[in-house]
Image (cartoon, rainbow, N blue to C red):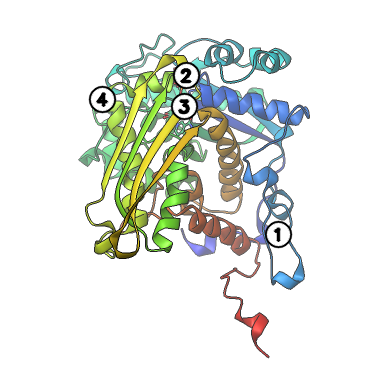
Amino acid sequence: MKSDKVRKKDTIEPAQGKLGVLIPGIGGAVATTFMAGVEAIKNKMALPIGSLTQMGTVRLGKRTENRVPYIKDFITLASLDDMVFAGWDIFDDNCLTAAQKAKVLEKDLIERLRPFLSRISPMKGVYNRQYLKNLEGTHIKAGKNYMDLASALKDDIQTFTKNNAIDRCVMVWCASTETYLQPAPVHQSIAAFEQGLKENSPHISPSMIYAYAAITSGVPFVNGAPNLTVDIPALNELSKKHGVPIAGKDFKTGQTLMKTIIGPGLKSRLLGLEGWYSTNILGNRDGQVLEDPGSFKTKEESKLSVLEHILQPDLYPDLYKDFYHKVAINYYPPRGDNKEGWDCIDIFGWLGYPMQIKINFLCRDSILAAPLVLDLVLFVDFAKRAGLSGIQEWLSFYFKSPMVAPGLYPEHDLFIQLTKLKNTLRFLMDEELITHLGLEYYMD
Ligand SMILES: NC(=O)c1ccc[n+]([C@@H]2O[C@H](COP(=O)([O-])OP(=O)(O)OC[C@H]3O[C@@H](n4cnc5c(N)ncnc54)[C@H](O)[C@@H]3O)[C@@H](O)[C@H]2O)c1
């Protein structure tokens, strides 16, 4: 990020016109719950609970100033009325049928949103069975090579933008978790990546093709899954070249959200950790995909990294060296999207005396994810208008495996992440950063 390109305060471009929201995986549980939710909120049928952009505030200046505006009044965000949705899926169900099949929302609500949901049909997806073993896509694009498929996606973006008089777009990956992929030479530079697209490199996954299409169309890209996708030098470099923000990876929702709330609390009181056993049962399509060992490995890596970074065993060997951390996900169809997470946490305190914490989180996966999608759409659009490009670390708050610049470790503590986010907004709006020092209130 070059600071001369960053626009602040009144020079940030206004949020005028329509905002196109492009979603790979538009027929999924998260995507349909998000879009239906936005429509319900616009029509005053429900509240945007869980969304920082809609309900959150930001303190400005000293505590004595009593300046605490809503974030949406502090910065210029696109209005929900200006959002237009489009996307791709590897199945051809329209969003009404997809929402009915996902069984997240009540039938009544879906019925009230019938006209809206039935109007949105997926465009054909870019699919490769190698990366998604447990789903057999039927609504897919054909192309000579990956570069051709990327061009077809770019054409889709252009046609959508033109037909709907769209002013700006953002893309959010809400499609399935792909099989585990490690960085390879083809990911290391733009030239190698583009060559790989022409040669159908086996190291280029479908999500990378979508991301390439988005970035080269000037569209910010958010990765809601743990896939490698934009977390490679080639696409990072490309995003800076095209002046577009990228953010990821893997929405931080149920169990990992809890870990990043409880973990920092234990560490701040210097309570030791012997082991943390996490298990989940879920029965949605995401659960079905995660039954495949390759996709599970991608998710597992994302979920496991959190505690190591928060607890810093190297700095605190007496408390956290060699703690046992296990994450299991079991596909259990009767529960559908209503995941049940169990955490058994073995901790120790003063003089090494052991204690236990049990967390049984009966959550709803897509209900937790939908407000994050909304915030990320609005914040990356804001970031682009403010001239930010490349990795948006200030959006770590939303991710299980936050992307960071090479050489940096990710910040996982939810509260540090929130402070970072709000300070970024203060910085862009030329407000004083808040350090929480507070000594000034006690000095004569
Ligand atoms: N709380 C959460 O729900 C949560 C949290 C973190 C991450 N995620 C991730 O978000 C993603 C979506 O979750 P979900 O519960 O909606 O899953 P889902 O299975 O209901 O939806 C995924 C959709 O993506 C489609 N798809 C798969 N590959 C595609 C491709 N190449 N192109 C276009 N469409 C494709 C599938 O057909 C499906 O409709 C998953 O990767 C999941 O791991 C979800």
Which is more toward the observer, 318 or 285? 318
Q: Which mark is residue 339?
A: 3
Nearer the N terminus, badge 4 or badge 1? Answer: 1
Seen as rendered, the residue at the extreme right is: 44
> Crowdedness of circle 2 by 10 Å Cα count: few (<14), some, many (20+)?
some
The vertical placement of 399 against 117, above or below, is: below
Q: CA distance from mark 4 to mark 1?
A: 50 Å
- Asked if the residues shown at circle 1 and circle 2 are in contact, with their CB atoms under 8 angstroms apart, the answer is no
Which residue is tagged 4?
293
Mark 3: is the Cβ under 8 angstroms from ligand 1?
Answer: yes
Q: CA distance from mark 4 to mark 2?
A: 21 Å
Amino acid bearing label 4: Pro
The image quadrant where one finds the C terminus is: bottom right
* Secondary structure category for the residue under label 1: helix
Is 96 displayed left or right of 199 in the figure?
A: right
Q: CA distance from mark 1 to mark 2?
A: 49 Å
**Comparing labels 1 and 2, the label whose residue is closer to the camera:** 2
Whole-percent x, y for residue 28 in the image: 50, 21
The vertical placement of 361 against 136, above or below, is: below
Nearer the N terminus, badge 1 or badge 3? Answer: 1
* Secondary structure category for the residue under label 4: helix
Nearer the N terminus, badge 4 or badge 2? Answer: 4
Which residue is tagged 1?
10
Q: Which mark is residue 335?
A: 2
Mark 2: is the Cβ under 8 angstroms from ligand 1?
Answer: no
Amino acid bearing label 1: Asp
The vertical placement of 283 against 210, above or below, is: above
* Secondary structure category for the residue under label 3: loop
**Comparing labels 4 and 2, the label whose residue is closer to the camera:** 2
